[in-house]
Amino acid sequence: MPDPIPSFALYGEDRAASPRIFAHIETIAARSSLHDWEIAPHRHADFVQILLVESGQADIALDGTQQACWAPFAVIAPPHAVHGFRFAPDTEGYVLTLSSDFVTRAQGPDDPLQRLFGQGGIAEFQTAAARTLLLLAREMLGQLVLRPDDTGLHLALAEAIARLLAALAEPGTAPSADPRIARFRALVERHFREHRGLDFYAAQLGTTRRTLARLTAARLGASPKQVIDQRLAAEARRLLHYTNAGAAQVAAELGFDDPSWFSRFYLRTTGRRPRMDKRAPSAA
């Protein structure tokens, strides 16, 4: 078995019971300064994390990609996305952590919150927009201190931050969604290691394979099998890059009976061989 990628609620803390819809905010310094301004790669199984950087610079690792960013900018890490940060000392900003159930505050399938929580990424924005986001973040942090039991207020402020960020990420647009697509993605997330056939997914959605194929082609620009394969390949890449597992171990972890079959699958899906995405060992 490969070494697991660390999974937390808040970085460095064991997962603990939390309200069904949960929102927490803290400054970047509150946690990062305790770790020499470096947050090692990790993920959150049940949480979305939003990083709002007010001043300073950070090297961002997000699902195997590396990028240097200068303030102001935001990083959105969806559930299961592996991410880590190396901040310049005295970088200022906020870390907003939301339960994945927070998306139930969306007002229908076309709500921009749906895409913000599902896609993730890095968003740079102008100073005026950053000023509004950071004003909301400061207010939320202050209210957590002054009114720690006013969950409704905390959630409302968190939603205001998320909605503004969604509008900045996609100005003037709204995703064309179908509730069956969201359900299909959730099923893939739950079962991708099991190598279920398309009949299983269609039956769970109460539709046919042909209808499912039309939906994913129209909404996602891919076939259902491509969506499943891409999710499986993404997990394989995370394990290769962030753990000490070799290709054979990753193959076994992800339900491939034959390592050579896994290697062919990985090459076909990503255009790369597994060894090309294996993290180089750290220098002693």
Image (cartoon, rainbow, N blue to C red):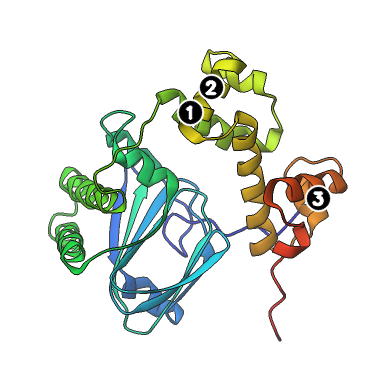
In primary-sequence order, the first of circles 2 and 3 is: 2
Q: Secondary structure at mark 3?
A: helix
Which quarter of the image is occupied by the C terminus? bottom right
Give the amino acid type for the residue marked by disc 2 in the picture. Answer: Arg
Q: Secondary structure at mark 1?
A: helix
How many residues crowd around disc 1 within 10 Å: few (fewer than 14), some, or many (20 or more)? few
Cα–Cα gap, marks 3 and 1: 30 Å
- Which residue in the structure is indicated by mark 1? 218
- Which residue in the structure is indicated by mark 3? 263
Cα–Cα gap, marks 2 and 1: 6 Å
Residue at 42% from the left image edge and 52% from the top image edge: 120
Give the amino acid type for the residue marked by disc 3 in the picture. Answer: Ser
Judged left or right of residue 273, residue 121 is left
Cα–Cα gap, marks 2 and 3: 29 Å
Q: Secondary structure at mark 2?
A: helix
Judged left or right of residue 110, residue 239 is right
Give the amino acid type for the residue marked by disc 1 in the picture. Answer: Ala
Q: Nearer the viewer, residue 267 or 108?
A: 267
From what the image shows, is residue 149 above or below residue 223?
below
